[in-house]
Image (spheres, rainbow, N blue to C red):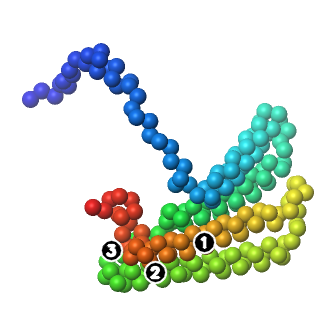
Amino acid sequence: MSTAELHRQITADEIAHTFEEEATPKVDLGQYAFEDWVALAIFWVMALSVFLQFFTRYVLNDSYAWTEEIATYCLIGVVFIGSSMCVRLSRHIQVDLVYRYLPHLAGRALSTAIDAIRIAFLAYAIKLVWTYIKVIGDEPMTTINFPKNYVYYAALLGFVLMFGRSVQVAVENWRRGYSILERPGAFDGTEG
């Protein structure tokens, strides 16, 4: 038996059809929520700050010190506000192996308990961040005269959004009768 490759002659029409445009898929921005757009805006402020830092340091050989601080504080906003997007989509790290071996009722009870614990933790985190904001008051940033509490307000907003999304996810799980922990295939399309 020969291992030589077989090639068939392709016509010019067949080549031309490969370049024809397929139907352009419609852009659906409806899947994005408020926190997605806020995190995107903060991300671009951070990216511009990092670019300005790079440009002034390596091109002008005289860096602006404030760009590093702005980028750091923007990263805090991106992380906490972006985390609410992960809560909404159930994309945080989770261990679902245990649920494969639990009976349905035990898995359902554990999943509901996890939803309740997450909601309670986020409510407590909101309280802690609010207390911290009251303690630091209008303490200025290191390199620019701008209060740090706005950075912590971004973290507070992130926790409030995560709390709201956690309640929303818990209610959806309760109505549906299962969560992503119990049936991950129902959420990623692998369940038949």
Report the Cα–Cα distance between label 2 and label 3: 16 Å
Q: Residue at x 80, y 63 (%)?
A: 150
Who comes first in sequence, dot 2 or dot 3?
3
Q: Quadrant of residue 74?
A: bottom right
Q: Amino acid at mark 2?
A: Thr
- Left or right of 109, for residue 34: right
Q: Residues within 10 Å of mark 1 (few under 14, many from 20)?
A: some
Report the Cα–Cα distance between label 1 and label 2: 16 Å
Disc assigned to residue 112: 2
Who comes first in sequence, dot 1 or dot 3?
3
- Residue underneath mark 3: 100
Q: Amino acid at mark 1?
A: Gly
| Residue 157 drawn at (x, y percent) | 70, 67
Label 3 SS: helix
Q: Amino acid at mark 3?
A: Arg
Who comes first in sequence, dot 1 or dot 2?
2
Judged from this view, the residue extending furthest toward the top is 12
Disc assigned to residue 52: none
Eye-nearest disc, 1 or 2: 1
- Counting every numbered tag in the picture gives 3
Q: Nearer the viewer, residue 169 or 151?
A: 169
- Left or right of 134, for residue 165: left
Dots 2 and 3: beta carbons under 8 Å? no
Label 1 SS: helix
